[in-house]
Image: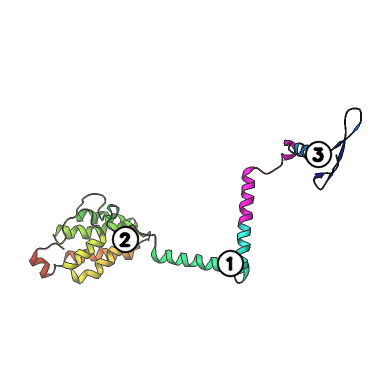
């Protein structure tokens, strides 16, 4: 059988038994060729399904990249510049904002997640963490000590589920001269607890100093005379 350009010529001549030439039309010849080529021995080295899928995927990526480079000023170089600018913007936002925080007020954001402990207990835990250089945990425990101490002095009403931000806002009403320091302390607490930031010794010493100062600070006359908890 003679094949030209992958197709059998018509009519093709075959020899049957007795060496008698046999004419065969185009369609049967093509079908015979297809049956012959479908033999598995011709496909032993063909790529498997995964390889074919990967080849198609990379072809698609290449076509997409070619189309984008044609539409972007500067071609391929322009695309690279755009990608680098986008990556830099994302990195800058991530660095500035930190890990996205959970919505405030949820149970997971409660300042005291480990059950009731005294201010003295929290201070002792903070001191142990500070001695070991674990500044994140030291900041957390010292902030809890501040809030617990205010509760023990009845400047805050003991309330399960209170967040650090709520505690600072409420305490600022009876301790207005320390409102800024309270907000800074809870901001540091939030950054290391929910924002993925890392505290250092200086951050811990600021919270420690605030705790010491608040211990010696008397509440405002208005809050003390009304007896209203902050």
* Left or right: 24 in relation to 45: right
Helix, strand, or loop for circle 3?
A: helix
Could you say which is closer to the camera, residue 213 or residue 67? Answer: 67
Q: Nearer the viewer, mark 1 or mark 3?
A: 3
**Label 1 vs 2, first from the N-terminus:** 1
Disc on res. 190: 2
Residue 218 image position (x, y, % from top left): 13, 67
Residue at the image position 58 percent from the left and 66 percent from the top = 80
Residue 117 falls inside the magenta stretch: no
Helix, strand, or loop for circle 1?
A: helix
Q: Nearer the viewer, mark 1 or mark 2?
A: 1
- Between the residue at mark 1 and the residue at mark 3, the CA separation in whole angstroms equals 52 Å
Mark 1 — residue?
Answer: 79
- Between the residue at mark 3 and the residue at mark 2, the CA separation in whole angstroms equals 79 Å
Q: Residues within 10 Å of mark 2 (few under 14, many from 20)?
A: many
**Label 1 vs 3, first from the N-terminus:** 3
Q: Quadrant of the C terminus?
A: bottom left
Could you say which is closer to the camera, residue 80 or residue 182? Answer: 80
* Left or right: 120 in relation to 100: left
Residue found at the far top of this picture: 18
Could you say which is closer to the camera, residue 169 or residue 211? Answer: 169
Q: Residues within 10 Å of mark 3 (few under 14, many from 20)?
A: many
Q: Quadrant of the N terminus?
A: top right
């Amino acid at each position: 059988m003679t094949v030209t350009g992958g197709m059998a010529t018509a009519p093709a001549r075959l020899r049957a038994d007795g060496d008698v030439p046999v004419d065969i039309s185009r369609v049967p010849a093509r079908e015979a060729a297809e049956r012959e080529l479908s033999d598995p021995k011709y496909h032993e080295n063909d790529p498997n399904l995964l390889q074919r899928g990967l080849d198609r995927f990379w072809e698609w990526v290449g076509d997409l990249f070619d189309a984008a480079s044609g539409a972007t000023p500067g071609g391929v170089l322009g695309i690279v510049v755009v990608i680098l600018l986008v990556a830099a913007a994302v990195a800058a936002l991530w660095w500035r904002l930190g890990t996205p925080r959970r919505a405030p007020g949820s149970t997971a954001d409660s300042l005291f997640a480990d059950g009731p402990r005294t201010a003295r207990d929290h201070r002792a835990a903070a001191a142990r963490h500070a001695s070991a250089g674990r500044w994140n945990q030291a900041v957390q425990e010292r902030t809890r000590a501040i809030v617990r101490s205010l509760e023990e002095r009845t400047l805050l009403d003991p309330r399960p589920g209170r967040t650090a931000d709520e505690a600072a806002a409420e305490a600022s009403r009876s301790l207005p001269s320390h409102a800024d320091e309270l907000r800074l302390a809870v901001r540091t607490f939030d950054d290391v607890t929910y924002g993925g930031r890392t505290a250092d010794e200086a951050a811990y010493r600021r919270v420690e100093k605030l705790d010491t100062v608040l211990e010696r600070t008397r509440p405002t006359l208005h809050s003390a005379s009304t007896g209203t908890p902050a």
